[in-house]
Amino acid sequence: MKQTFTKKMWRETGSAYFLLSPALFVLLLFIIGPIVFAVFLAFHKVQLLGTTSFEFVGLDNFARIANDTRAKIALWNTLKYVAIVVPCQTILALVLAATLNAGLKGQKFFRIVYFLPTLTSSAVLTLIFMWMYNQNGFINHVLEAVGLPTYNWLGDPDVALNAIMIMNIWSTAPYFMVIYLAALQDIPDSLYEAAELDGANAWQKFWHITVPYLRPVTSFVVVMGLIGTFQLFDQSYIFSAGSGGPNNSTLTVVLLIYQYAFKTLGTMGYAAALAFALAIIILIATLIQRKLSKEESLY
Amino acid sequence: MGKTKWMATLGIATLLFGSLLAGCGGEKSEQANGGNKQGEKVEVTLAGWGGNPSEQKLLQQTIDDFEKKHPDIKVKYEVIADQYMDVIKTRLSGGQGPDVFYLDAFEAPALIETGALEPLDEYVTDEFDIDDFEKPMLDAFKGEDGKIYGFPKDYSTLALFYNKKMLEEAGVEVPKTWDELREAAKKLTKGKDVYGFGVAPELARLYYIAESKGGKVVTDNKASFADSKVVDALQPIVDMHLKDKTAAQPNEVGATWGGEMFGQGKAAMVIEGNWAIPFLQDTFPNLEFGTAELPTINGKKATMAYTVAYVMNKDSQKKEAAWKLISYLTGKEGMKTWTSKGYALPTRKSVAAELGFDKDPLRAALVAGAPYATVWQNGTNLPIIVNNFNNQFVSAFLGERPLADALKEAEKTANSEIESQ
């Protein structure tokens, strides 16, 4: 087929772009622009204070990552965090959704209650949890009452990151639960009826119908979870007052980026390089996940 | 959560780009504001971190006095509540910095080096009487070029705070040396409820101990704290926690800082500064406590001094007015008002003599420390060195690894970070 661009088509395209221009302008200014600028920064040594200077250093900033012990610790902490939080929150979300979809009495009430943590701002949530995690706080009192060992949740490098993990699983799982709930409504009842006729019990129905049917949603949940957990910042920032302590145990990649960008002078370029590297890591993780789940629909 | 993360990323990116835009904008408005007409009121921005309400009231009073004396100047006082230095650095690089602001001596060398601050030597008059300042505090704000970039508004040293009742019950005298303190702590400790000594395992509070045996924490602007002399000097602190079990850090007993730990009666002795006095008096009015000069190490007296100055933004368009403000606030009259209640100690000798804090029962120990105190500052790389020291020292303090190993690794990390700058 031969395509001709008539005058009318040009005019239509033109007016379309004209109408899009406010959105495009915002997109360019606030999304594309900063991304391009961040990439620019990643290849420069930047001094913003006093005499502003941009000195081209090529790949030096990236080479520096390889020799940076703190970057390695941050990456290791983040990977550990991702490896534990993503599976836990996904399974918890699925279980919660399935329970709340089983037709129990008062399930609407419980849906609301479970969803509440997601509505709370993560900063407020962190502060409340820090209060509960206090050496003489609620959680240690409960542990003591049931005869379990207590921990110095905030001050012990071995448990500080776990404390953040527990808090985040608790607060994020309900968000994904809602997504699972929506997907559960889509599963035709006929499938369950057929399974019942074949004599399947509740567990078998869950394992052989619900889980496979939800696979595309699970894929989505895992990808969003990966992106979210790789970017852990606010919780560990508040937990450690910005230092990533005790003993670098709550230092995450984004927190390190923040420290280099705004705390130490003249390392904005290196911070941008770290951010660039993190973006690539997330991209790779997402690609691997997609390969594993072999599911390309939905997103 | 995924969503908030995206928002945060977007926020940071926008901030980056926004500061660039703001930078361009700032230059234009500077030109527009260039010449101030006579008779027009000049507005000077003063930024600082907030103190307690009584401190805020005192500062407001000082500012009011200034405005009365200079009817053509209006002071806009801004409180930056959290992450003060991050905010100031971002605003300065965006061209939106305040005209006059607080600067901690610890951060001063790095900020002076960037050239973001106005040297103040030209403005100084004889009347301002520069020799009246305590020299170590003033030197903290001198650049490499020998120019003065800020005038210290106040300072505090560290002193030993002790709970009178607990010491009496245990029958211990106020310790005069570190060995005595260690013995006293043993008698004062009651299991895990009360520790003899509350300690902050961070370099800002341990620096004078670290250097007490002749080692240096920083040499040629690089970390050198893995020196065996530094390790030896710090080992007793770790031993008190791990072996004697007579010392603890505040978060082990559920407190956020030493003053709180001490006030709650979970530590019989802590080492804190002037800031703890009003806090303890307000929050724990029934607590009977005393202060003493820090115990000596090897017979030598040592303590830390923390000082904060008023500095001027180099990009300020109202430098004349800004200087008038700084010279009033750090002048004899302004400093007297500001330090009159003893929330802060005056850096001018004449004001100190007039207010007589050296005779105040609680503050005498702090004032006595001033002549031999080490000012908390050491070159442009100290922030990096501190960060690495603190992180690793905690692991030794908690008994995860020997102190020597921890400090060796921290020194290596700090120096590789400094070298790759």
Image: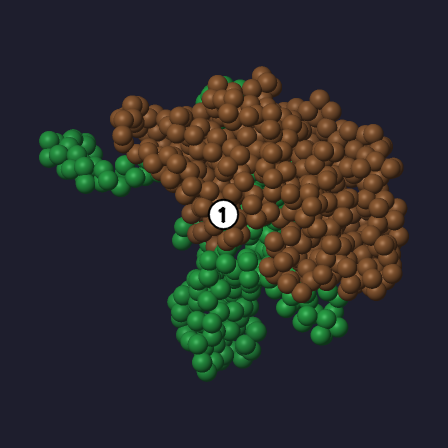
Chain colours: A green, B brown
Q: Name the one closer to the observer, A145 or A4.
A: A145
Q: Is residue B18 left or right of residue B356?
A: left
Q: Nearer the viewer, residue A152 or B324?
A: B324
The chain under label 1 reads B
- The structure residue drawn at horizontal position 63% and vertical position 58%, both measured from the top left corner, is B281
Position of B191 with respect to A213 (left or right) is: right
Pick out the residue farthest to the front.
B354
| Left or right position of B46 against B335 | left
Residue B322 horizontal/vertical position (percent): 42, 30
Residue at point 54%, 68% (across, down): A95
Q: Is residue A263 visible?
A: no
Q: Amino acid at mark 1?
A: Leu
Q: Residue furthest top?
A: B145
In screen coordinates, is B183 left or right of A251?
Answer: right
Q: Residue furthest bottom?
A: A105
Identify the residue at image location x=84%, y=49%.
B175
Give whichever of B202, A179 is nearer the camera: B202
Q: Which residue is mark 1?
A: B58
Residue B386: x %, y % from top left? 67, 36
Pick the front one: A286 or B326 = B326
Tell me if residue A238 can be seen.
Answer: yes
- Name the residue furthest left: A8
Query: In what element is the residue under mark 1?
Result: helix
